[in-house]
Amino acid sequence: MSRIRVLRDAAAVAKEAAEFIALYVKSKPDARVLVATGNTPVPTYEALAQLNPDMSDTWAVQLDEYLIPDDDPRLLYAWMARAYLTPLGVTQVLRFDLSSQDTQRMCRLHADKISALGGIDLAILGLGPNGHLGFNEPPSGADAPTRAVTLSQASLASNAAYWSAAPHGSRAAPRNAVTVGMDIILKADTILLLVTGQHKRDILARTLSETPNPELPSSYLRDTNLVVITDQDVTGGAA
Ligand code: F6R
């Protein structure tokens, strides 16, 4: 089942998404939340912090990470800590263990820990410019596992914008990454997909209209319990 809410701008998306998350957590105080970073959810996390929900029993599960040294400021974990964990007071965290030299083992352990927790209740996702979810790049089928990946040119180009401004200077976007698999994402009890900006309009329209296929990983979302909150009207006017 999917529901789409089309709102007037990114601020309205953030407000409504924050209210959605706050309500979810109120009804399930120990929710296991899969947490996207990237630009899209940042205003939502800010709006959520304003609502001051009690998130102390929730779990934050890391969705994806770059394979870079553990003290590199570009770590997505650092972003997640800054934007989500600290402002929301979340201390129970499942993070990719970058100390493991064996990436296959690192991924297996992350997936095993998610399963031991009981899977994901709420997945908060952004939408990649090529339909990637987490770093499940095309082609990724519905059963793609948690694994190491090489980022596509499209993803590198969009991620490069994260690091071009201060305080990171003109550092390149890392090329190698790990991601929670489609198999885990698609089994989440509820998926909240946040999409803002004109540049995401076409990929959102494709996500909601194409028959699910590995060339557009986000197309599999249509078969999940999906809530889309967006400022792009791809519905032909319905809100
Ligand atoms: C980040 C992530 C990515 C982003 C996607 C959209 O943790 O999982 O899939 O959600 O690349 O990024 P933004 O929101 O920066 O457009």
Image (spheres, rainbow, N blue to C red):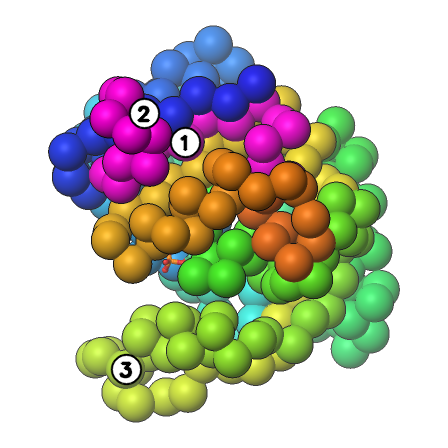
Q: Which mark is residue 164?
A: 3
Asked if residue 185 is positioned above or below residue 138 in the image, the reply reads: above
Q: Is residue 6 left or right of residue 226?
A: left
Q: Residue at point 50% right, 62% down?
A: 130
Tell me, yes or no, if residue 82 can be seen here: no
The boundaries of the magenta stretch are 220-239
Q: Secondary structure at mark 3?
A: loop
Q: Which mark is residue 228?
A: 1
Q: Secondary structure at mark 1?
A: strand
Q: CA distance from mark 2 to mark 1?
A: 6 Å
Asked if residue 67 is positioned above or below residue 129 in the image, the reply reads: below
Q: Which mark is residue 177?
A: none
Q: Is residue 18 left or right of residue 73?
A: left
Q: CA distance from mark 3 to mark 2?
A: 32 Å
Q: Amino acid at mark 3?
A: Ser
Quadrant location, ligand no. 1:
bottom left
Looking at the rendered image, the quarter that the N terminus falls into is top right
Q: Residue at point 51% right, 38% down?
A: 209
Q: Which mark is residue 5?
A: 2
Q: Amino acid at mark 2?
A: Arg
Sequence-wise, the earlier of marks 2 and 1 is 2
Q: Residue at point 64% right, 63% down?
A: 138
Q: Nearer the viewer, residue 166 or 190?
A: 190
Q: Amino acid at mark 1?
A: Val
Q: Are marks 2 and 1 in contact (CB under 8 Å)?
A: yes
Residue 11 place in picture, x, y as percent = 16, 38
